[in-house]
Image: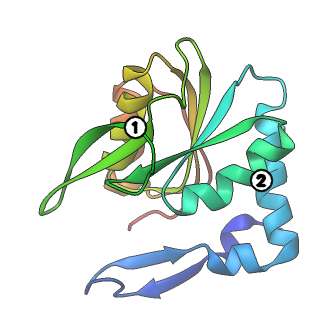
Amino acid sequence: MPIKSLIRTVPHYPHQGIMFRDITTLLKDPVGLHAMVHKIVNRYTDVRIDKVVGIESRGFIVGTPVAYELNLGFVPIRKRGKLPADTIGREYQLEYGSDRIEIHVDAIQKGDHVLLIDDLIATGGTAEAAVKLIEDMGGIVVECCFVIDLPDIGGRARLEAMGQKVFALCEFEGD
């Protein structure tokens, strides 16, 4: 079963002209959910990874079962002010303004090999900030993994220009 066929497109959400790619339809399908996790896990079974890091919030949904199946710990990267203990953070630019993501200061150890996961790569701003945050802590990003790539928006190319490897289960072109 192709993963892409289980992803719903919601036109004009959250703004006019946006084609929102909704993974909730993939997640609610037991066969689709299993296939998504299985495909990601199979890719990384023989790769040295110390931790799986997921970006808020759908990266948590995808990353946690992957970490579990790989017998690894899971680390959340959250938006500003959401983590309870000491954090470090990175600012990143949005279309209008900026935002900040944070991680606990004890989440990544120097030399940890990290798999970064999120549901979708679009412009790449959040993923770029997450990569830099992991690197700030001394971690090594093994690969940036996504369920969906929107290649025409440029996020994949942005990460690759930083020297990052990028993997996605499917693409939606023209969006």
Q: Residues within 10 Å of mark 1 (few under 14, many from 20)?
A: few
Total marks placed: 2
The quarter of the picture where the C terminus appears is: bottom left
Q: Amino acid at mark 2?
A: Pro
Residue 119 - label: none
Q: Secondary structure at mark 1?
A: loop
- Residue that appears at 56% across and 11% down: 111
Q: In the picture shown, does residue 165 fall above or below 120?
A: above
69 left or right of 51 in image: right
Marks 1/2 in contact by CB < 8 Å: the verdict is no
Residue 86 - label: 1
Q: In the picture shown, does residue 31 fall above or below 124?
A: below
The quarter of the picture where the N terminus appears is: bottom right
Q: In the picture shown, does residue 86 fall above or below 151?
A: above
Q: Looking at the image, which residue sits at the far front? A: 85
Q: In the picture shown, does residue 126 fall above or below 144?
A: below
Residue bearing mark 2: 65
Q: Nearer the viewer, mark 1 or mark 2?
A: 1
Q: Secondary structure at mark 2?
A: helix
At which x and y percent is residue 166? 53, 36
Foreground residue among 166 and 109: 109
Res 128 → quadrant: top left
At which x and y percent is residue 139? 51, 20
Q: Amino acid at mark 1?
A: Asp
